[in-house]
Amino acid sequence: MFVDVARLIVAVVLLEVLPHEPVIDIGGAVILLPLVFGLVAYLCGRWATRRVLYRPGQAVARFERRRLLLLRVCRSLDIVLYALLIGVFGWAQAVEQSRLNFAVARELLWLAPFMLASFGAAAGSFRLATFFWQPKPSMLQYAGLRMRFLALTAALYIFLFVARGMMEAHALRALLDCFPSLEILLAGALIVVAYLLFPVGLRYVFPSRPLPEGPLQSELWSMANSLRVRLSGIQLWDTQGARLSTAFVTGATGWSRWVFISDGLLTTLGAEQIVAVFAHELGHVLRNHAFYYLLFFVSLLLLVLPLDAGLDLLGVDKDSLEVAIVVVLAIFALWVLSFGYLSRRFELEADLIGATLVDDAKLYSKTLMAVGMVSGVSSERNAWRHFSIDRRRDFTTRAGNDPAFRRRWERTFRRLRSLIVAMALLSCLGFGFLFGQETSQPDAAIWLHAGQRVMARGEPQTATDYFKRSIDTGPSFAAFFGLGHAEELQDHPAEALEAYGGALELSTSAAESLWVQQRIERLRP
């Protein structure tokens, strides 16, 4: 799920930073390219499968390395093809020139090629991904499972887009233009709301039902109740034939917290092992990992403000494509590395608590190995969010036998949570400092900067109002010149000449006067 979130973030960022004008203009034929690129992704996945297909006598370790490498390449195809469609063939411009007036429909159309390429890549590479799965799903079952993950992530993005648009459509828009740091605060608030509502959507995207009544259900609920863990339900996740073997807990609050156990896991593990898996998920709840994840996400978002201020101090042109790409890549790399580091250690902490709850380190170790086997995951392979199965087994075994080792790691986990809280406090202090600087400016400067930001966004009509408010509270050369430029862009030559006249009167240098006079000469009949 988190990998799909990361991939969708990359797609949205590409849509924002890449130029929308086509390098290769193929006219109306661009409409067919999403289907073509989806087919290309499928064929590439099929080719990769044939290249790596296991043969008797081949070294398993070498085969696994090649399989994972080509699988990652296949799963990156949608990003590469989407970048080509946006930056080379001008898909975004084609959507903008369409007659769609409904904003949500435009957003869906912008992302449609990415979704099609993802489906093609998943369908083409499904044999690579499910090589070790038992039982194996069909191609459509696996691709459908991958698309449900991506669809839920896309729905989250659409929710954020719609909520932000509804807020900006009212008086809040002027406030955000005057104080841009509030944009980040608003985004953070929307992320919190989406994070709290996400588990509710998850239940509808992934078909599930309460775990059937019986001794296993009673034992799981008894464990949760004895630890005073509030759950809204323990769900059996129907993977629609994909037989995915996994379990997870979702939700930061009791009313939105469910534990999902997939049908594949329930049919391949014994009751004691299911209890051990459930104990691991309760470990996440007992240490409030969902809350710390949320705190981590919002803190990283607020760190954008000091970065933005630092670029201003260095005089960097933030509007250039090169700077935008470098900044986005740097922030994304920071998020990937820091979240991977945090997630791996939270998983270790949940392992530690899970092994303690079942009070049987050997059973827990065997459960880890069994989950890895039925999931088709190599026991030696490190994942983005998890250490390898072998390392997790060694960790829980040693923690059970060596109290000093266990205490040392418990201190590490406490320090990590304290670090997240400290990062959140520093981010809030940084936001407060920058917001204080924005509000401490004179009203004229606030409206002037708002007008300049709106002009850069391509909204001269709104900028006209802001420049007039700046002139009313404190006339300046920059405000009159900005007003003249805004009126000029709206084909109001008389108003533009009047504004440029005011700028000429307030000019403080020969260069400014010459600049304005050139504009006036160009407008005079």
Image (cartoon, helix red, strand yellow):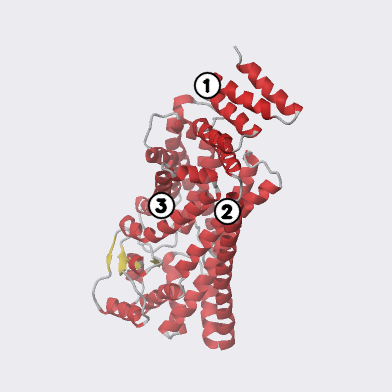
Residue 231: percent from left, percent from top: 33, 71
Q: Is residue 380 visible?
A: no
Q: Nearer the viewer, mark 2 or mark 3?
A: 2
Q: In this view, does 194 lie above or below 381?
A: above
Residue at (44, 28) in percent of width and height: 97
- Badge 1 density bin: few <14, some 14–19, many ≥20, Cα 10 Å: some
Along the line of sight, the residue nearer the viewer: 44 or 282: 282
Q: Which quadrant of the structure image shows residue 433?
A: bottom right
Q: Which of marks 2 and 1 is nearer the N terminus?
A: 2
Are circles 2 and 1 on residues that touch, CB within 8 Å? no
Q: Name the residue under label 1.
A: 492
Image position of 247 with respect to 170: above or below: below
Q: Quarter holding the N terminus?
A: bottom left
Q: Which of marks 3 and 1 is nearer the N terminus?
A: 3
Name which residue lies at 59% across and 54% down.
Answer: 436
Q: Quadrant location of residue 520?
A: top right
User: Left of 77 or right of it: where is 160?
Assistant: left
**Type of amino acid at the residue the image marks with label 2:** Phe
Asked if residue 410 shows in the view, the reply is yes
Amino acid type, callout 1: His
**Badge nearest the viewer, 3 or 1:** 1
Tell me the CA gap for discs 3 and 1.
42 Å
* Element class at badge 2: helix
Disc 3 residue type? Leu
Q: How crowded is mark 3: few (under 14 residues within 10 Å), some or many (20 or more)?
A: some
